[in-house]
Amino acid sequence: MTLANRGNFNAIIKLADQLETADTNFSAFALQLRQLARQFDEDAILNFLAQYQVETV
């Protein structure tokens, strides 16, 4: 089960922060992910990650 499926939006925001801190090349990606997490929209998050073929956490 993914963080989005569990509704763990705070953890998603934290992961986006960590990703951006680790590599600023991911800033735009992390920003979009944080925005979706703040909207509490798990379907939008999963669709967003699928666009980048990211394995969900």
Image (cartoon, rainbow, N blue to C red):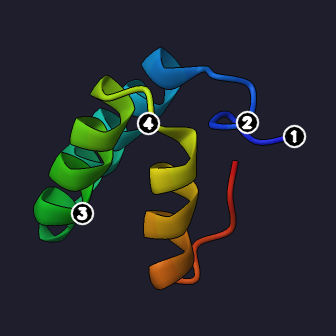
Residue denoted by label 2: 5
Residue 35 coordinates in the image, percent (x, y)? 22, 39
Residue displayed at 21% across by 43% down: 21
Quadrant for residue 10, please give it.
top left
Q: Amino acid at mark 4?
A: Leu
Q: Earlier in the sequence, mark 4 or mark 1?
A: 1
Point out the frontmost of discs 2 and 3.
Answer: 2
- Which residue appears farthest toward the right when viewing the image? 1
- Separation of marks 4 and 3 at Cα, in angstroms: 12 Å
Q: Amino acid at mark 1?
A: Met
> Helix, strand or loop at disc 3?
helix
Tags 4 and 1 touching, CB below 8 Å: no
- Separation of marks 4 and 1 at Cα, in angstroms: 16 Å
Residue denoted by label 1: 1
Residue 21's place in the image compared with 27, above or below, is above
- Separation of marks 2 and 3 at Cα, in angstroms: 20 Å
Indicate left or right for 15 with 2 as reference.
Answer: left
Identify the mark at residue 15; answer none if there is no mark.
4
Camera-nearest residue between 25 and 54: 54
Q: Earlier in the sequence, mark 4 or mark 3?
A: 4
Q: Which quadrant of the rendered structure holds the N terminus?
A: top right
**Residue 14 visible in the displayed image:** yes
- Separation of marks 4 and 2 at Cα, in angstroms: 15 Å
Residue denoted by label 3: 29
Q: Earlier in the sequence, mark 4 or mark 2?
A: 2
Residue displayed at 33% across by 49% down: 19
